[in-house]
Amino acid sequence: MKKTWLAGSVLMGLMASSAQADTLLGFKIGGDLWAADTKGTFAQSGEPQQDFNYDSSTQGSIWVALEHPIPLVPNVAIRENRLKDDGSLDNADFSFGGRDFSGSVNAKADLSNTDFILYYELLDNDLVSLDVGGAYKQMHGSYLVSQNGLPAEKDLDDGVFMGYASAMVGIPGLGLFGFADVMAGLDESKVYDYALGLGWEFDGIALDTRVRAGYREFNFDTNNFSGLTSNMKFDGFFAGVEIDF
């Protein structure tokens, strides 16, 4: 009985949210630049993890979203995340990609990925907006270790199913808002990607523009993921813009 009541409540909530949503199709496009610090370890599964020293570098994300008024059909967003950094290690003694390494080595961590997001607008007004749904983060990077110009590389080509939530709280009439975007791994509980920040919205005749800035963290702690073990983190401040047609 409780399960039936809960399912009915969720269904009514989604139907109510659709009634609150825009009556026309909406299209969003945006991008962020992210001054991220990189830290962490990786190794081929079965080998001890290696702690490389990474440089700080600028990362980036771009996204598009399509929102519609069709009841019970989720909205769609796709976000591409570029996450690459170079590292180095002295006194190495390990195997990777079929090669043995010792002494000074270089590395490249590429955790670039694409987010495929399905979500519902549970609230959508000038004061509060709330989107909830699910996502699939498809990794398409690699780990590379090289010495004397000879590389050994292993691809990251699996994905992670994640829960998704995005909230925004605004001050009506001023355009100022705070926001939080969260993705948390379901099958990989130590993989998460979240952002917190403030923004300013400028209303236009044909489109609205949002300027935003804040802090973002991507944590990738996995075991035997694409034959690799990782405990990597990218975190730092970002700034970007979103256009709502």
Image (cartoon, rainbow, N blue to C red):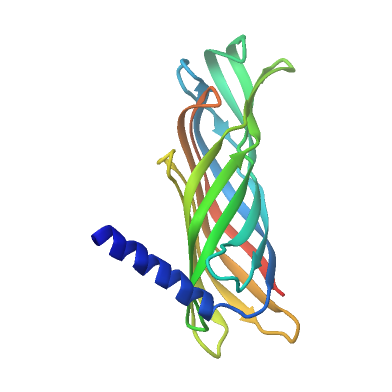
Q: Closer to the camera, 15 or 27?
A: 15
> Relative to residue 189, is residue 101 depicted above or below?
above
The residue at the far bottom in this view is: 173
Choose top left, top right, bottom left or bottom right for residue 70: bottom right
Locate residue 57, reporting x and y percent.
Answer: 64, 45
Q: How many marks?
A: 0
Residue at image location 57% in from the left, 64% down from the top: 73
> Relative to residue 159, is residue 162 depicted above or below?
below
Q: Tell me if I can see residue 35 in this picture.
A: yes
> Relative to residue 231, is residue 127 depicted above or below?
below
Choose top left, top right, bottom left or bottom right for residue 140: top right
Locate residue 53, reporting x and y percent.
Answer: 55, 31
Give the quarter of the figure containing the N terminus.
bottom left
Q: Closer to the camera, 125 or 34?
A: 125
Give the quarter of the figure containing the C terminus.
bottom right
Left or right, 32 with reference to 125:
right
Locate residue 146, reporting x and y percent.
Answer: 67, 19
Residue at image location 56% in from the left, 26% down from the top: 226
Q: Tell me if I can see residue 129 in this picture.
A: no
Q: Closer to the camera, 231 or 52?
A: 231
Residue at image location 45% in from the left, 18% down from the top: 48
Q: Closer to the camera, 16 or 211?
A: 16
Locate residue 218, reporting x and y percent.
Answer: 51, 47
Left or right, 83 with reference to 125:
right
Residue at image location 49% in from the left, 85% down from the top: 171
Left or right, 163 with reference to 81:
left
> Relative to residue 94, is residue 210 depicted above or below?
below
